[in-house]
């Protein structure tokens, strides 16, 4: 079963910004992970190319109810620091051998508790969301290479897979594959690096030598799958599948320190040319007969947290705009679900509703532009999302 491909070049991009604070309202790490998984799935279904996790300066500390009891008390109870808390006289531990055994047991318990704390340490909500988003987007066969164990990923293995085209299955004869550069090269004077592209027992030799550990996108001739001998491929930009025939190739994840940084640190030349804010106080709704998107090259849709976009702007001291004037930041200020039946729409619900309702307007007004050849530069190859967020683990290692 293959993901439908539009076979039409797509040169416009879709970005969405979500505050990381939304996960701090979930009571356990498992529920937080599921919430992020819902956002990731919605992004993949509707071809989102970039997810920005921004700090709305309204988040509270996350509490881990699931692990809090066992970690605070270890084996010895509350406040024991992970060592057994027992009365030697009461237990009549008097012999030297017994005392040595108890001391070793205490040390072992303390070491185990330290390992547990390292393994299940909590991140701030924004880093948590970004890390889980990265993990979900990474093809399964690459996770072991890029993501060592981390507590944020304890329940990531329970999430439904993204199952996007870049998550190529073992027997699939795909034109493009994601890979990790190995510490090996082919034979000959002009030999390139070998890349693990998820083809069992057959690393791919690429057209250049790259530093080991880099994640890259490789283009293959589909005939090579059935041909004996080594497989050769060409390194391309991760945007090439989208620009060639509209194949969705996952999303990148970006951390922003504030809502202002969402705009200021845009990775696209010229910035976002269509900025859409979502609010129940929007001055236009998708139900309006005249509602439409203007032509755009880079679309940005921003979602607020529990208190909405207005509160995010009020909390950001670097913004000279008042929250009540938030509409001035956007080209469109949209109420995505007028006359909602609930007092509130959760952010993960708003993401799915908005992307679904915007879909026909995006398809109609996205500026496909003329297809231009893309020159791949070495700095384009390592596109691991965000700074120091790739410390995660594979499905087998999580939890």
Image (cartoon, rainbow, N blue to C red):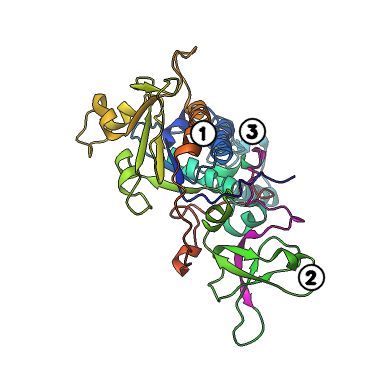
What secondary structure is found at the residue carrying circle 2?
Answer: loop
Q: Residue at x 39, y 30 (%)?
A: 304
In 3D space, how far apart are the residues under numbered discs 3 and 1 (Cα atoms)?
Answer: 71 Å
Of 327 and 102, which appears nearest the observer? Answer: 327
Measured from the top left, where is residue 349 in percent x and y? Answer: 52, 26
Residue 180 covered by magenta stretch:
yes
Locate residue 323 relative to residue 119 in the image: left or right.
left
Q: What kind of secondary structure does the magenta stretch mostly adopt?
A: loop
Q: Residue at x 57, y 49 (%)?
A: 8
Of badges 2 and 3, nearer the viewer stands: 2
Q: Earlier in the sequence, mark 2 or mark 3?
A: 3
Q: Earlier in the sequence, mark 3 or mark 1?
A: 3
Q: Tell me the magenta residue range.
A: 158-185
Quarter of the image that includes the C terminus: top right
Residue corresponding to mark 1: 359
Q: Would residue 120 be visible to someone looking at this image?
A: no
Measured from the top left, where is residue 112 in percent x and y? Answer: 61, 48
What secondary structure is found at the residue carrying circle 3?
Answer: helix
Of 62 and 34, which appears nearest the observer? Answer: 34
Q: Are marks 2 and 3 in contact (CB under 8 Å)?
A: no
Badge 3, how many Cα within 10 Å: few under 14, some, many 20+? few
What secondary structure is found at the residue carrying circle 1?
Answer: helix
Of 161 and 97, which appears nearest the observer? Answer: 161
In 3D space, how far apart are the residues under numbered discs 2 and 3 (Cα atoms)?
Answer: 74 Å
Of 168 and 152, which appears nearest the observer? Answer: 168
Measured from the top left, where is residue 199 in percent x and y? Answer: 73, 62
Identify the disc placed on residue 227.
2
Locate residue 335 relative to residue 348 in the image: left or right.
left
Of badges 3 and 1, nearer the viewer stands: 1
In 3D space, how far apart are the residues under numbered discs 1 and 2 (Cα atoms)?
Answer: 41 Å
Badge 2, how many Cα within 10 Å: few under 14, some, many 20+? few
Residue corresponding to mark 3: 90
């Amino acid at each position: 079963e293959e993901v439908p491909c539009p076979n039409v070049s797509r040169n416009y991009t879709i970005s969405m910004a979500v505050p990381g604070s939304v996960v701090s309202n979930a009571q356990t790490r498992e529920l937080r992970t599921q919430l992020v998984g819902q956002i990731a799935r919605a992004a993949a279904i509707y071809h989102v190319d970039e997810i920005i996790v921004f700090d709305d300066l309204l988040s509270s500390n996350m509490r881990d109810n699931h692990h809090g009891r066992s970690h605070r008390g270890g084996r010895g109870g509350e406040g024991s620091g992970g060592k057994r808390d027992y009365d030697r006289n009461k237990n009549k531990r008097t012999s030297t051998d017994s005392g040595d055994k108890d001391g070793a047991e205490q040390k072992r318990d303390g070491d185990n508790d330290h390992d547990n704390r390292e393994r299940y340490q909590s991140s701030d909500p924004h880093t948590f969301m970004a890390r889980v988003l990265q993990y979900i987007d990474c093809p399964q066969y690459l996770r072991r290479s890029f993501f060592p164990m981390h507590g944020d990923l304890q329940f990531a293995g329970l999430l439904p897979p993204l199952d996007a085209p870049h998550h190529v299955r073992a027997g699939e004869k795909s034109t493009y594959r994601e890979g990790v550069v190995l510490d090996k090269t082919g034979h000959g004077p002009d030999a390139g690096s070998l890349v693990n592209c998820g083809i069992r027992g057959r690393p791919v030799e690429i057209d250049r030598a790259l530093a080991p550990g880099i994640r890259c996108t490789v283009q293959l001739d589909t005939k090579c799958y059935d041909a004996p001998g080594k497989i050769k491929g060409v390194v391309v930009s991760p945007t090439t599948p989208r620009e060639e025939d509209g194949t969705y190739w996952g999303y990148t994840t970006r951390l922003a320190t504030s809502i202002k940084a969402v705009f200021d640190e845009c990775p696209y030349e010229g910035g976002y040319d269509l900025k859409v804010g979502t609010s129940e106080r929007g001055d236009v709704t998708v139900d309006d007969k005249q509602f439409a998107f203007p032509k755009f090259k880079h679309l940005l849709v921003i979602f607020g947290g529990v208190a909405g976009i207005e509160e995010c702007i009020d909390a950001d001291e670097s913004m000279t705009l008042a929250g009540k004037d938030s509409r001035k930041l956007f080209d469109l200020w949209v109420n995505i679900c007028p006359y909602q039946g609930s007092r509130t729409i959760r952010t993960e619900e708003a993401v799915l509703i908005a992307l679904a309702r915007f879909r026909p307007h995006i398809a109609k007004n996205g500026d496909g532009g003329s297809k231009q050849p893309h020159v791949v530069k070495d700095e384009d190859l390592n596109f691991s999302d965000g700074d120091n967020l790739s410390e995660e683990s594979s499905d087998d290692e999580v939890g």
